[in-house]
């Protein structure tokens, strides 16, 4: 039986910008290592893998919530030209619950990051999409 969400991994070219983005949301770096060769090549299905693997943890979250960043040194990362298109098949977005969506938006914008839209009130929540690292859509949700 599935117990709870564990982590989401995002492949990034700009590792520092991704660290900053998730840092604004309250994630702290827990560990950073380089993964290379076996068993990672077989497990990931990526021959010749060499990548920075950074684990970010949301402070004071129960259960533990992680974002893992992968920055490939080898092979070169492959672009997803449709990553921003929310009508494509597959991964759509990730959403984090927040206490004050307006305050979070202000912090995001103060750090040079952008929202994709204005706040929407839907299903007893205030929702907003953020332009996340490498075009990944990150949503914030404030229940009311």
Image (spheres, grey):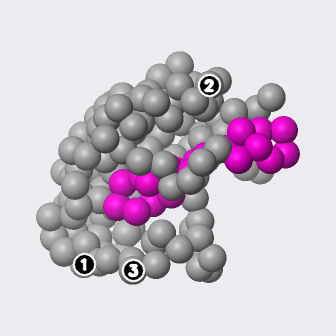
| First in sequence: mark 2 vs mark 3 | 3
Image quadrant where one finds the C terminus: top right
Q: Residue at x 42, y 29 (%)?
A: 107
Placement of 29 over or under 92, stated as above or below: above
SS at circle 1: loop
Q: Residue at x 31, y 41 (%)?
A: 112
| First in sequence: mark 3 vs mark 1 | 1
Which mark is nearer the camera, 3 or 1? 3
Placement of 138 over or under 144, stated as above or below: below
Q: Nearer the viewer, residue 43 or 54?
A: 54
- Report which residue position mark 3 lands on: 81
3D distance between C-alphas at marks 3 and 1: 23 Å
Q: Which residues are magenta?
A: 120-139
Q: What x and y, as percent, mark residue 17? A: 25, 46
* Residue found at the very far top of the displayed protein: 60
User: Callout 1: few (<14), some (14-19), or many (20+) C-alpha neighbours within 10 Å?
Assistant: some
């Amino acid at each position: 039986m599935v117990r709870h969400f564990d982590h989401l991994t995002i492949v990034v070219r700009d590792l520092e910008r991704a660290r900053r983005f998730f840092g604004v949301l309250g994630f702290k770096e827990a560990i950073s290592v380089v993964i290379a060769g076996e068993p990672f090549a077989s497990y990931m299905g990526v021959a010749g893998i060499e990548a920075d693997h950074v684990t970010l943890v949301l402070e004071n979250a129960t259960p533990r919530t992680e974002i893992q960043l992968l920055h490939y040194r080898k092979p070169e990362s492959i672009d997803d030209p449709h990553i921003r298109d929310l009508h494509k098949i597959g991964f759509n977005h990730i959403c984090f619950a927040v206490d004050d969506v307006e305050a979070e938006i202000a912090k995001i914008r103060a750090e040079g990051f952008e929202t994709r839209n204005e706040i929407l009130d839907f299903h007893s929540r205030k929702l907003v999409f953020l332009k996340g690292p490498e075009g990944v859509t990150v949503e914030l949700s404030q229940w009311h």
